[in-house]
RNA sequence: GCCGGAGUAGCUCAGUCGGCAGAGCGACGCACUCGUAAUGCGUAGGUCACGGGUUCGAUUCCCGUCUCCGGCUCCA
């Protein structure tokens, strides 16, 4: 009994029993066989050396793809565990999956790993890789597996959990052996340890067993593995690049913002230059919202506990809120973690007609959330931040059109800030939910068609929606390929119910509107943090706190430099005239280091002829003798906001 | 919150096996007056995170607290 395989080119071929994926890959081409790490039949994984048990759509997975890398990273994780068990007798090992850009493995050796431990372990791993030990797959009954891992409590727990269908078949699990080491694993793996071309351990840290802080804390070792030493070197270079772009570091260097300990953890202060950046972004946001039919509202920072009871926040979100403060005979007030209840009160302040819908209420609303101290991370994760928040009250029949327009709006805004790559997640109805199922279905299909209409790539996260409604999250890729979640669009069937919202229809009946929560930047602070890292501090001119620096060559040119500065300011530009007692070279270096987009150098010739030397960021070299009028006009043009 | 690491000048860091605290950059002053990425010389700047303990003496050792960093978890 042979197998019939459909190859990616559509051809169908038959193979005798016992044929392996490697045999097929070799037949297709030796280079393919060389790069192969595993094969798939109809999405089922096979090790290269495992006989194919059935026919179907056949595909060779190579090591230079994301799928292939995750196979070799998984194998690298095994080698890591093998090294640790070898070096630390009695070590317990838990789980070791591949992750984005690497892998980890969780251990218990009774103490944390030190940097010296990591060096030893890495050396041991390289030895194991050198020995090119074959990975051998084996299937065991649950009982046999329990015996094999008798002294490994975490493995035993996993095996006992396998009954719920995580195993490879009825009452059977697979293990992989190489040398004396054996690990429970579904696979697949590369054929032998020598097929891991480049590996490096990065760090260790604590991690809870199964992510549960009530359970034992294990020691996790992170590493990365790649298809070639060049790919590894590139990755390490990207890590350095990310460090160079760190918004916390650039915030200090560019004098944008800081996090004084006196203030409290997770709270930022904005310096004048950061203030300009923020103001430009916020002004832009207000402008485009006004242009897109939003009305600007303003609401306070605290509200009575009753309001948070009605909205359900105290029931579902209390641990994310600042504790109450008491005043007026024990009346409790909470600082707001969200703006929605306030916007709802605006809606409910009088009776609403169908003619007013969709009613779009927008606010740059500053909220405070209690974040556990360990998770704070500069602007990206703060305790106080400002949302570009709006709530749209819409008739159910208009929801689809509203969502489609909204998604276009989101993409327009993100493109205006220089982001070009987008991916979305559509989160659908969870097990616990409010609202009628057919309402959910209509909302989900409305979100789906909005995504289709926008031509956006999206993944469906089944059951990941909030209990109150489905949502779309929009992610962007930054300049070094990192993915960030920014915008969110959430349909809400619960709050209109909680607050008893209605509007009067054209038939003079009263109907409940649907509510949409949406934020484009999400948090202005976090968005700026991402922008700083995306641009490595070199913002497009319209966002630059300083748009041009004027450098006089010598003291006698200061008056002309001031004149140039005045002209630029009249054209609306933010300008510094650097009259400091320094060399021209030093002043230029300073402007460049501060990422100013334009430097204008003026000397004798310029003062006489009414010209400037113009050096633009990113240009190969400067232009000399540019007429001042021309320089002013072109810089003003280059510094205009996108809209 | 938990695990690990750290906190010395505005920034980046060295140092003190317990005995008067150091560099580079930055700031300030003086000289230089200069044409596209660092001119030279000088000066100031420190509760060695904070509080307690041990000690003749603590920046150094011990305990606690705060803050930061890497993770866990959670999210915008």
Image (spheres, helix red, strand yellow):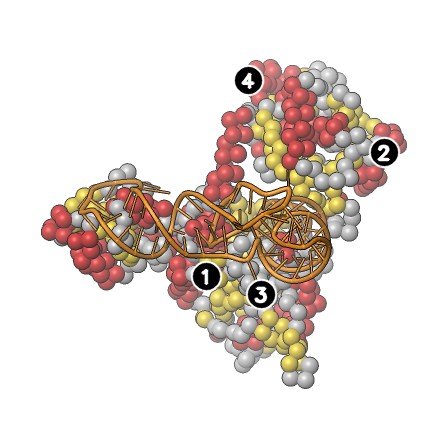
Residue at x-position 64% and y-position 30%: A119
The quarter of the displayed image where residue A278 is located: bottom left
Badge 4 density bin: few <14, some 14–19, many ≥20, Cα 10 Å? few
Residue at x-position 57% and y-position 15%: A30
Cα distance between the residues tagged 2 and 1 = 55 Å
Cα distance between the residues tagged 4 and 3 = 57 Å
**Which numbered disc, 1 or 3, marks the residue that appears first in the sequence?**
1
Are circles 1 and 4 on residues that touch, CB within 8 Å?
A: no
Residue assigned mark 4 = A31
Cα distance between the residues tagged 4 and 2 = 43 Å
Residue assigned mark 3 = A368
Foreground pick, A148 / A191:
A148
Provide the chain ID for the residue under circle 2: A
Decide if residue A384 is on the left or right side of residue B1.
left
Mark 2 secondary-structure assignment: loop
Q: Is residue A362 above or below residue A149?
A: below
Residue assigned mark 1 = A270
Residue assigned mark 2 = A151
**Which numbered disc, 4 or 3, marks the residue that appears first in the sequence?**
4
Cα distance between the residues tagged 1 and 3 = 17 Å
Decide if residue A423 is on the left or right side of residue A116.
left
């Amino acid at each position: 009994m042979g197998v019939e395989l459909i190859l990616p080119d559509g051809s169908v071929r038959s193979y005798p029993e016992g044929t392996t994926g490697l045999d097929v890959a070799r037949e297709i081409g030796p280079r393919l066989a060389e790069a192969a790490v595993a094969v798939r039949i109809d999405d089922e994984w096979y090790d290269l050396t495992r006989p194919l048990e059935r026919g179907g759509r056949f595909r060779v997975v190579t090591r230079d793809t994301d799928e292939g890398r995750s196979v070799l990273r998984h194998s690298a994780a095994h080698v890591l565990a093998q090294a640790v068990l070898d070096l630390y007798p009695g070590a317990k090992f838990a789980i070791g999956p591949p992750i984005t850009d690497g892998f980890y493995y969780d251990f218990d050796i009774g103490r944390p790993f030190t940097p010296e431990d990591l060096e030893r372990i890495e050396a041991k791993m390289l030895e194991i890789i050198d020995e090119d030990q074959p990975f051998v797959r084996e299937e065991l009954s649950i009982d046999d597996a329990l015996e094999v891992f008798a002294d490994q409590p975490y493995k035993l727990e996993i095996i006992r959990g396998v009954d719920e269908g995580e195993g490879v078949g009825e009452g059977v699990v697979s293990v992989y052996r190489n040398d004396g080491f054996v690990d429970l694993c579904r696979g697949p793996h590369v054929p032998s340890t020598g097929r891991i071309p480049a590996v490096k351990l990065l760090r260790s840290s604590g991690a809870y067993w199964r992510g549960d802080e009530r359970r034992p804390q294990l020691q996790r070792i992170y590493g990365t593995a790649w298809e070639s030493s060049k790919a590894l070197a590139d990755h390490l270079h990207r890590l350095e690049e990310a460090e160079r772009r760190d918004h916390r570091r650039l915030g200090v260097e560019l004098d944008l913002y800081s996090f004084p300990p006196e203030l409290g953890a997770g709270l930022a202060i904005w310096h004048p230059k950061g203030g300009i950046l923020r103001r430009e972004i916020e002004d832009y946001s207000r402008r485009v919202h006004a242009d897109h039919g939003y009305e600007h509202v303003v609401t306070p920072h605290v509200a009575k506990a009753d309001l948070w009871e009605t909205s359900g926040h105290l029931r579902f979100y209390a641990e994310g809120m600042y504790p109450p403060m008491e005043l007026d005979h024990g009346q409790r007030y909470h600082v707001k973690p969200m703006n929605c209840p306030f916007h709802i009160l605006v809606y409910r302040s009088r009776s609403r007609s169908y003619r007013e819908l969709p009613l779009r209420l927008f606010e740059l609303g500053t909220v405070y959330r209690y974040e556990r101290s360990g998770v704070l991370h500069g602007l990206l994760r703060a305790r106080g931040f400002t949302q570009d928040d709006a709530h749209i009250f819409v008739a159910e029949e208009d929801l689809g059109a509203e969502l489609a327009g909204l998604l276009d709006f989101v993409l327009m805004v993100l493109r205006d800030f220089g982001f070009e790559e987008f991916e979305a997640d559509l989160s659908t109805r969870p097990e616990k939910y409010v609202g009628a199922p057919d309402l959910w279905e209509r909302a989900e299909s409305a979100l789906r068609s909005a995504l289709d209409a926008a031509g956006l790539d999206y993944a469906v996260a089944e059951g990941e929606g909030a209990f109150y409604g489905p949502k779309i999250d929009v992610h962007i890729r930054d300049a070094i390929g990192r993915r960030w979640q920014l915008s969110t669009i959430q349909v809400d069937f619960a709050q209109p119910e909680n607050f008893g919202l209605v509007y009067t229809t054209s038939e003079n009946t009263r109907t409940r509107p649907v509510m949409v929560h949406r934020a484009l930047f999400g948090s202005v602070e976090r968005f700026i943090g991402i922008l700083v890292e995306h641009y490595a501090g070199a913002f497009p001119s319209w966002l630059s706190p300083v748009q041009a620096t004027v450098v006089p060559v010598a003291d006698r040119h200061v008056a002309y430099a001031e004149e140039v500065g005045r002209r630029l300011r009249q054209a609306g530009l933010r300008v510094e005239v650097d009259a400091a007692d320094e060399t021209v070279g030093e002043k230029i270096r300073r402007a460049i280091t501060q990422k100013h987009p334009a430097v204008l150098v003026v000397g004798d010739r310029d003062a006489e002829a009414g010209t400037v030397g113009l050096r633009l960021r990113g240009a190969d070299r400067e232009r000399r003798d540019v007429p001042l009028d021309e320089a002013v006009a072109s810089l003003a043009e280059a510094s205009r906001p996108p809209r």
